[in-house]
Image: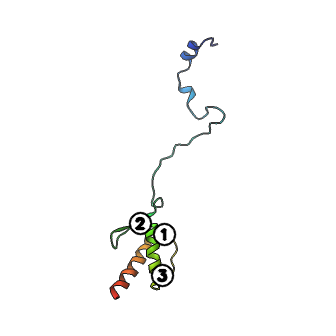
Amino acid sequence: MIFNFKQFKEAVSGTELVGNHMGPGYPQQVNKANTLTSTSTDALLCNIDDKIYTYDDYQSKYHEYLKIGGTPLTGFNQQNLDHIILKLTEDTEES
């Protein structure tokens, strides 16, 4: 039995206070890597004109695409961006 603080300090190494169950009110924490995936960003690189398009840039190009008679597309992705840029470059070459 521990009767004073010095005995308590010698008995407890410190690792007992750290771990999954520290007491009520401390939920279990899961360590998870903070990695980025292709869906974690709001910018796309277009290989046709070598520019980076943010979501706002994509929306402005998409509205230009619709004004020249393009069909509606769904989603902010690489395939749609390539399709829009190709259609816009074809339209400017014909003009």
Spot the residue most to the right.
Answer: 24
Dot 2 amino acid type? Leu
Asked if marks 3 and 1 touch (Cβ < 8 Å), the reply is: no
Asked if marks 2 and 1 touch (Cβ < 8 Å), the reply is: yes
| Mark whose residue sits in front, 3 or 2 | 3
Asked which secondary structure carries label 1, the reply is loop
Disc number placed over residue 21 in the picture, else none: none
Among the two numbered marks 3 and 1 on one chain, the one whose residue lies closer to the N terminus: 3
Asked which secondary structure carries label 3, the reply is helix
Q: Residues within 10 Å of mark 3 (few under 14, many from 20)?
A: some
Disc number placed over residue 66 in the picture, else none: 3
Give the Cα distance between marks 3 and 2. Answer: 20 Å
The reply, left or right, for residue 1 in relation to residue 11 is right
Dot 3 amino acid type? Leu
Disc number placed over residue 76 in the picture, else none: 1
- Residue at screen point 36% across, 81% down: 89
- Residue at screen point 39% across, 77% down: 85
Among the two numbered marks 3 and 2 on one chain, the one whose residue lies closer to the N terminus: 2
* Residue 6, placed above or below residue 36: above
Give the Cα distance between marks 3 and 1. Answer: 15 Å
* Residue 31, placed above or below residue 37: above
On the image, numbered disc 2 is attached to which residue? 44
The reply, left or right, for residue 24 in relation to residue 79 is right
The number of numbered badges drawn on the structure is: 3
Residue 45 in picture, x, y percent from top left: 38, 66
Among the two numbered marks 2 and 1 on one chain, the one whose residue lies closer to the N terminus: 2
